[in-house]
Amino acid sequence: MRDVLIIESFKNNFCLENYLTKCSTFTAKKILFFRTGHINLPVSPYNNDINIDKSCKLCNSDILCDEFHVLLSCKALEQPRKNILKLPKNLSTPNTYNFGKIMSNHKLYNNLATFINHLSSLFSNV
Ligand SMILES: [Zn+2]
């Protein structure tokens, strides 16, 4: 259910997304990988094994480690979120509305891609 809510929060129309044509290849690829669950998070559309613990190992919580968690609420990522993502104050509260705004805000795309690249390195060996 939550997966559906997250996807619907930033994908409103069945169309080519602006970030694919307006960003550098690096930025577009990183955002595309993140949006399609390809950064190796424990919760992913490609990980249906119910025996795998999908809680966040970065903050040692029982919270599912999905895109929403790492982007907005993981306590272990507060500093990288502040230094790399540099969210405006009005978008830093963890909720699906802000998640959608971040995913569709072209002014944040370069920082978002760098943050996703950081996440990829953290989860490459998990
Ligand atoms: Zn966490």
Image (spheres, grey):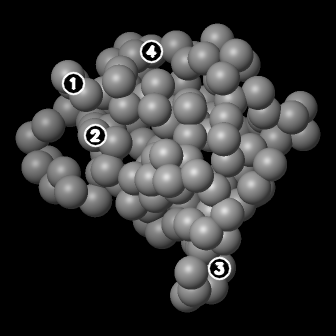
Of 80 and 19, the residue lying toward us: 19
95 on left or right of 55? right
Name the residue tied to disc 1.
126
Image spot of residue 16 (x, y percent): 56, 81
Characterize the local packing of mark 4: few (<14), some (14-19) or many (20 or more) Cα atoms within 10 angstroms: some
Of 29 and 5, the residue lying toward us: 29
Q: Earlier in the sequence, mark 1 or mark 3?
A: 3
Name the residue tied to disc 2.
40
Q: Of tags 4 and 2, which is closer to the observer?
A: 2
Distance Cα–Cα, label 2 vs label 3: 25 Å
Distance Cα–Cα, label 3 vs label 4: 31 Å
Q: Look at 76% across and 55% down and name the residue there.
A: 105
Looking at the rendered structure, the secondary structure element under dot 3 is loop
114 on left or right of 95? left
Image spot of residue 99 (x, y percent): 67, 51
Image spot of residue 72 (x, y percent): 63, 35
Looking at the rendered structure, the secondary structure element under dot 4 is loop
Q: Earlier in the sequence, mark 4 or mark 2?
A: 2
Characterize the local packing of mark 1: few (<14), some (14-19) or many (20 or more) Cα atoms within 10 angstroms: few
Type of residue at label 4? Cys
Kindly indicate whether the residue at mark 2 contacts the one at mark 1 (C-beta within 8 angstroms): yes
Quarter the N terminus occupies: bottom left
Type of residue at label 3? Asn
Q: Look at 75% across and 55% down and name the residue there.
A: 106
Q: Using the rendered view, name the quadrant where residue 89 is placed.
A: top right
Name the residue tied to disc 3.
12
Q: Look at 57% across and 86% down and name the residue there.
A: 15
Name the residue tied to disc 4.
59
